[in-house]
Image (cartoon, rainbow, N blue to C red):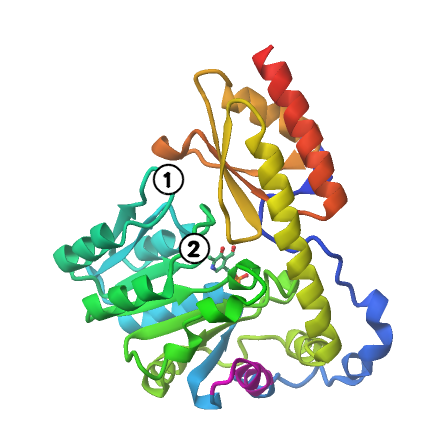
Amino acid sequence: MTPKITLKLDANELPFEESLESRREEFPSLLTASLNRYPDANASALCTHYASFQGVADSNIIAGNGSDEVLDLIYKAFTTQGDTIVSLEPSFVMYGMMAKLFKCRYVGVPISHDQNIQVDVFIEAITTHKPRLVFICNPNNPTGALIQKEDLYKILEATSGLVIVDEAYSEFICDGYQEYSLIDSIGKFKNLIVLKTLSKAYGLAGLRIGFGLANEELIKALYSVKYPYNISLLSQNIALTLINEDFMSRLNDNRLCIINEREKLYNKLESLKYVTPYPSSANFIWLEVNTQVIDLSTFSEALKNSGIAIRQFDKGELKSFLRVTLGTPQENELFFDTFKTLLEEGTA
Ligand SMILES: Cc1ncc(COP(=O)(O)O)c(C=O)c1O
């Protein structure tokens, strides 16, 4: 029988419950919505709302059914079969999966042993492979490493291809996370697309809403391959109603709580034998396990049997790594205690 998962720390979601039940009075528009009608084809009101929050014009934004859809639109609009795509290795799996789907050649440039990007090596790979698309996830999923703005500028200048900076986790970097964003550079770099999502720090993964931000020409190209009505009426209405001042202040509290929890859990993990956590700027921690001492598949099985789901990687060189998403303070405590006990049992 498959064990029941009671602690879900495998998908980098926000752990704080967000339900319509608790916010009934804010949603009269859901009850009166005309479900026999199609929604706004381009989620225009939502785009305007989010664009003004990010300080860009309506012509600089497109909404997707999750940022996964924006990734798909990027491949559709800008690649042809046989094009080369460059990203970090490891990074978000969808970049490579989509390259396969669109019959492109995917080159993953390994990160250094301390799990950071080696900018010179990365730029060398760009110069060699002349990619059509370059994907940089910042902070990087799954390693949590942060790439500095100056390095991103160097990468943007080193290629004539498009550079997609995926800022899915940027709200978790630090208190003043906006400083690290490249949204303010979309006017300057003609080859830059920034990806954002409501699935992570906003805690709205169930709505499936993400955005692409870029100059007008690139956004027009993305619109030209987008199906109409890609975001449901209910998702548009809920996001528009929810994202108000009150929500933004809760978002701030939530992300600061996660940043604080990250520090706490990192320090605790660092005290354990046979485990090396890496510094993270996201809502998860990347861990290396000494597989000479710990049998990772037995250990992961035991963790699962305790009802805890974290992310394990089965690819060759990643086999000794785990990624754990931060939960609520109580969940993180439960995770750590269980993790520690099983580790001790595994090395007894
Ligand atoms: C780096 C990164 N980009 C994009 C996504 C997709 O997010 P969305 O839910 O907006 O499709 C994820 C989801 O895990 C992610 O890790």
Return the residue at label 2.
146
Up/down of 231 relative to 8, above or below:
below
Residue type at mark 2 is: Leu
The residue positioned farthest toward the left in the image shown: 128
Residue 296 position in % (x across, y down): 51, 23
Q: Secondary structure at mark 1?
A: loop
Q: Which mark is residue 213?
A: none
Residue 193 position in % (x across, y down): 37, 73
Q: Which mark is residue 114?
A: 1
Q: Tell me which segment is drawn in magenta.
A: 46-56
Q: Residue at x 71, y 80 (%)?
A: 244
Q: Residue at x 81, y 78 (%)?
A: 26
Q: Could you tell which of marks 2 and 1 lies nearer the N-terminus? A: 1
Q: Residue at x 37, y 56 (%)?
A: 95
Q: Secondary structure at mark 2?
A: loop
Proximity of marks 2 and 1: CB atoms separated by less than 8 Å: no
Residue 7 position in % (x across, y down): 70, 40
Q: Quadrant of residue 236?
A: bottom right
